[in-house]
Image: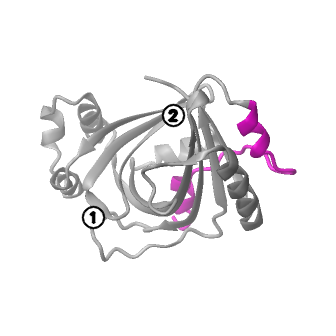
Amino acid sequence: MKFRHEWKIEITKSDHIVLRSRLLAVMKPDPHAENGRYSIRSLYFDDPVDRALREKIDGTDRREKFRIRYYNGDTDYIALEKKSKRNGLCSKQSARITKEQAGAILSGDIEFLRDSENALFRELYLKMKTRSLRPKTVVDYTREPFVYAAGNVRVTFDYDIRTGLSKTDFLSENLVTIPAGDAPILMEVKWDEFLPDIIRDVIQLSGRRAEAFSKYAQARIYG
């Protein structure tokens, strides 16, 4: 499991404009983005006592959460992901899941996870059985991604964060999400062993610092 450094910084609209122009001078837009951005829809899992939410709010150093997500409304490619945090570093494990399999999970038919050769599938099955992990809420947002080869750096702007409240049918085109409170624009900076000075310099903003922020926790603002 490979761990990476990660900063999350809340910024304003004017910050966003300034930073975007700076980044375009030194970084490349992610080639997978359409017109420089893409939409993300995620479905987060939690247990009956909201362990994932509480650990995030409490700042627990060793924590994990499961989600399934797709991009730009395209359900032909859906990913099951487990995000882990250890000693301030983050890692992500991912496995492709079909639309039919995602639908089965939503309906509670999860035996295929147990029988899978994929370790991440089997782990989700185990957590759903032993911890009663279940789909909790949908989160929608828009992302602008930039990449830089040295240090494997990725800088993203996430905004228009929306919540499905208690709705979990994230495959439905008719699912309505609403703004997740007064959610900020979020800049995320991720890198491997080192963050090049040129990137460190261009992302500097007076009065801004890295903070703990979770789009899942923001989406749970109404319960």
Going by the picture, which residue comes out furthest to the front? 25
Residue pointed to by mark 2: 63
* Residue 31 % position (x, y): 45, 49
Quadrant hosting residue 139? bottom left
Residue stretch in magenta:
197-223
- Residue found 66% across the figure and 25% down from its top: 194
Quadrant hosting residue 5? top right
Viewer-proximal residue among 207 and 103 = 207
Quadrant hosting residue 179? bottom right
Count neighbours of disc 2 (C-alpha within 10 A) and say few if under 14, some if 14 to 19, many if 20 or more.
some
Count neighbours of disc 1 (C-alpha within 10 A) and say few if under 14, some if 14 to 19, many if 20 or more.
many
Residue type marked 1: Leu
* Residue 51 % position (x, y): 47, 43
Residue 219 is one of the magenta-drawn residues? yes
- Name the quarter where the N terminus is drawn: top left
- Residue found 74% across the figure and 36% down from its top: 198
Residue pointed to by mark 1: 171
Viewer-proximal residue among 18 and 46 = 18
Residue 183 numbered tag: none
Q: Is residue 168 left or right of residue 100?
A: right
* Residue 163 % position (x, y): 48, 67
Whether residue 220 can be seen here: no
Residue 103 against residue 66 in the figure, above or below: below
- Residue found 54% across the figure and 68% down from its top: 222
Indicate the secondary structure of the residue bearing disc 1: loop
Residue 78 is one of the magenta-drawn residues? no
Residue 106 against residue 49 in the figure, above or below: below
Indicate the secondary structure of the residue bearing disc 2: strand
